[in-house]
Image (tube, helix red, strand yellow):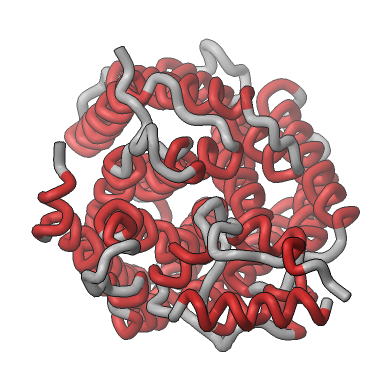
Amino acid sequence: MSAPAAEASGPPFLRVAPPPSLPMRHFVLAALALPIFAAAVALRAGDLTGFVDARLALGTVHVLTLGWIAQTILGAWCQMIPVHGQAPLRRTRVLAAGWWLFSLGGAAYVAALWSGWTRYWIAASVAAAGAILELSVLAEAHARSPRRDLAWANFTAAFAWLAALAILGVLLARDRGRGLIFRDPEGGRIAHVHLALIGFVATAIYGAGLRLIPWVAMGGMGGRRAARASFLLTQAGLAGLALDGLFFGRRLMPLWACLLAAGFMAYAWQLGPMLDGGPSLNPSLAFTALAFAGGACWAAMGLGLAFGAFADAGPARAAYIWVALVGCATPMILAQVHKIAPFLVWLSVYAPLAQTAVRAPSIDELSSRRLAWLEFLLLAVAAPLGAAGLWLERADILRAGALTLLAGGLAYALNLGLSLSHLTRPEARRRAP
Amino acid sequence: MVDEEDLPNLETTVREMLERWPGTGPVLALRGLDLCCGGMHPVGIAARAHGVDPDALLAELRAAARRA
């Protein structure tokens, strides 16, 4: 039997909300993964510049992609899909089981890569099974949603790409570059990386942004045509790139890079009205701006690689991936989690006190704005430093970037801990069943 | 003349507020109220979550809705 939604008899917005522990467990694990990634890069910077140790690099990247980015996106989906879509999750225990499998499988996969265990594809399969289990619950609710807007279309595409990514990842892990499954293993890896970076991460973030960014800035998002164009260009570019990489010898990479860059520009175009007004600058808005700056660098580097403006080799590719993950996806995630996590804690602990005389703290009091600004500043330094270190193959610069990212990640974990500490307060314990 | 029944109240959700009365957006934005997590929460609860007096906020929202 599945666990019921948080408040079956509460107000409408709580009837569709999942138990707060579902998104929160994703956010907590993600907050641990980011500092682990940064610490690993700082410790082994010499081996990571130029991908001297490919397995170390692969394991380290997956700490970030599986541990930080995928966990946060899945956690946000646990909240957004039922609440935004007005369709409660039906099998929350299955989703929780999927989270355990995904988390343990992901950790085992990284440990196997780092330790040199050759059958790491077994752990990859466990992680993929967990992800697919989680997705099946989320997708079922998503399919029932009466709200079929462009964000819904983006989420649908991200679901499909993530499933394709998981399957391709397992096949690549099984193939281990031997060319047994894919004749062009390099093309397979390029397809895999872009299914992850663009198909899952960017498409999910585009979708979430369509619903959350206007509310961060309150400027409104203009140009539905631009949003539709962004969706179509991005999906066409990614499908072309993946098929070209897997089956057609990477012949039209400049075309796919142009389509993807155009998709990003169309998406960014919608943000213009936000500049006309809205609230004073706050950490979430600053993180959003940082993410778009990082996205512009990412798109420019993609075009440069595709058109041969600079050597399409390990250092430039590593910098490209760093910019995508640390320079673009990470600040966008921080922008959104800084809104979502304190809100969920407040809703869980203090919303029931709203009708009483007891004074409840506001959402802003559940976390530290100063710490959030510190996270922003550290990330704004870490992103370019790390990219420069990888591109120039300078371990000292990469280490400096990683240590800065580590400080930012620890500040974020501390800030999240401040919010979560409210769950242990007497008000929360009184509500415990 | 705006029908008083066609104005927001404390049970109106933040999302509905912005969809039906877009002119209330700046009022909400100035107090840090947004559509986080879907905006399915009533304005009254959102106001308390942000440490804002719900009745004073409602008065401002209604004024903004009338102007729109």
Asked if residue A390 shows in the view, the reply is no
Tell me what residue is drawn at x 74 percent, y 51 percent.
A306
- When the figure is inspected, residue A24 is found, relative to residue A189, above or below; the finding is below
Seen from the viewer's position, the closer of residues B12 and A400 is B12
- When the figure is inspected, residue A181 is found, relative to residue A265, above or below; the finding is above
- When the figure is inspected, residue B56 is found, relative to residue A124, above or below; the finding is below
Tell me what residue is drawn at x 11 percent, y 60 percent.
A425
Residue B54, percent from left and from top:
48, 75
Seen from the viewer's position, the closer of residues A59 and A426 is A426
Count of labels in the image: 0
Residue A416, percent from left and from top:
26, 63
Seen from the viewer's position, the closer of residues A17 and A237 is A17
Q: Is residue A160 left or right of residue A358?
A: right
Image quadrant where residue A424 sits: bottom left
Quadrant for the N terminus of chain A in the image: top left
Quadrant for the C terminus of chain A in the image: top left
Residue A197, percent from left and from top:
56, 45
Tell me what residue is drawn at x 63 percent, y 74 percent.
A217
Seen from the viewer's position, the closer of residues A14 and A379 is A14
Residue A250, percent from left and from top:
74, 34
Q: Is residue A330 left or right of residue A411?
A: right
Tell me what residue is drawn at x 44 percent, y 80 percent.
B53
Q: Is residue A359 left or right of residue A247?
A: left
Seen from this angle, which residue lies furthest bottom?
A: A280
Asked if residue A123 shows in the view, the reply is yes
